[in-house]
Amino acid sequence: MDIFVQQIVNGLVLGSIYALVALGYTMVYGILGLINFAHGDIVMVGALVGLSVFHALSGSGLPVPLVLLLAVGAAMVVCMALGVSIERLAYRPLRHAPRLAPLITAIGVSILLQYSAALVWSKQYIPMPELLSPTRFTVLGAHVTDLQAAIFLLACGVMAGLYWFITKTRVGTAMRATEQNKEVAGLMGIDINRIISLTFLVGSGLAAVAGIMVVLYYGIGHYSMGFILGLKAFTAAVLGGIGNVRGAMLGGMLLGIIESLASGYIGDLTGGFFGSNYRDVFAFLVLVLVLVLRPSGLLGQASGERA
């Protein structure tokens, strides 16, 4: 029982990070019908920018909460500027092109971001400086640190704030109207280009927060870290129903729990052969099963249009 609770706790923390990244995928897909495969690399840029701030201020004597706020702020500014620039320069000219063109462009942007990051931060793994000393406590037999609790609560707070923004504000209403029908929304006076840019802005800001959480959780950053993370977040978005904000949140949490339980229990049954080193297999197995059994996802609606 203790092992089960421990895996659930680990899965919720990991799943909350997946959910934040998945929201960026699902928001862009909902409005543009585009799978932005460069989104995971925006997370990577946010993580490495945060690590740079952590290293620059680690010996400055500033309070740790202030250092964290500065790192998050710097990562959000860089990622938001990067996301809006990518939309303006790479995706907007191809908005009316066949779907294959923006998809290939997204893959190209992803590769460009990876190797640009390798030039800036090198190809070496960058460790997290020792700013935090997590305190461990026990809940229902599971070992939990205050850092894990903070990551989970912050992620849930950010997701709740985003959901309120989308459902209760005028800008959120404009985003939902643009998602349903861009042409009609434009006739109603909504600035479509502005709303799409805002979607990339918000999604990239969430990616920056997720990137900081990743380096705090794992204690390390790398120029290629966004690739697998992005694919897992895409899997979470598909699991919940891509284009559905609540589905992205649910899919991220479920994927984290499935991955933790599978890597823990199946790893024990196979003598460690299918353990944590093979946890990525379980995530992509979920993707295959969802695409075969329920392509619209858990909360998505079936559509007659072929993707």
Image: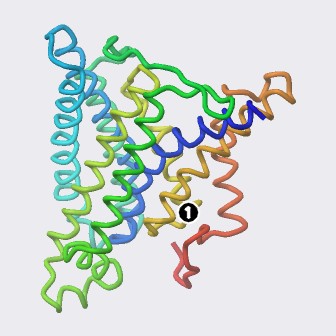
Q: Give residue 147's position: percent from left, percent from top.
A: 43, 28
State the SS at label 1. Answer: helix
Foreground residue among 122 and 272:
272
Count of labels in the image = 1
| Residue 162 location, quadrant | bottom left
Q: Nearer the viewer, residue 1 or 306?
A: 1
Side of 111 where 279 appears, left or right = right
Q: Residue at x 56, y 57 (%)?
A: 251
143 vs 38, nearest the viewer: 143
Q: Is residue 161 left or right of residue 151?
A: left
Q: Is residue 126 left or right of residue 229?
A: left
Please provide percent x and percent y for residue 140.
67, 34
Q: Quadrant of residue 118?
A: top left
On the rendered structure, is 48 left or right of 228? left
Extreme-top residue of the structure: 59
Q: Quadrant of the N terminus?
A: top right
Q: Residues within 10 Å of mark 1 (few under 14, many from 20)?
A: many
Residue 294 lies, in percent from the top left, at 67, 69
Q: Is residue 280 above or below residue 32?
A: above
Reply above or below: 228 against 285: above
Against 270, residue 227 (above or below) is: below
Residue positioned 48% across, 45% down in the render: 16
Task: Identify which residue, 48 or 131, lies in the foreground.
Answer: 131
Q: How is the image coloured?
A: rainbow
Q: Amino acid at mark 1?
A: Gly
Compared with 65, 83 (above or below) is: below
Residue on which disc 1 sits: 240
Q: Residue 150 appears at what percent x and percent y?
A: 40, 35
Q: Residue at x 60, y 40 (%)?
A: 11
Q: Would you identify the image quadrant in which residue 47 lies?
A: top left
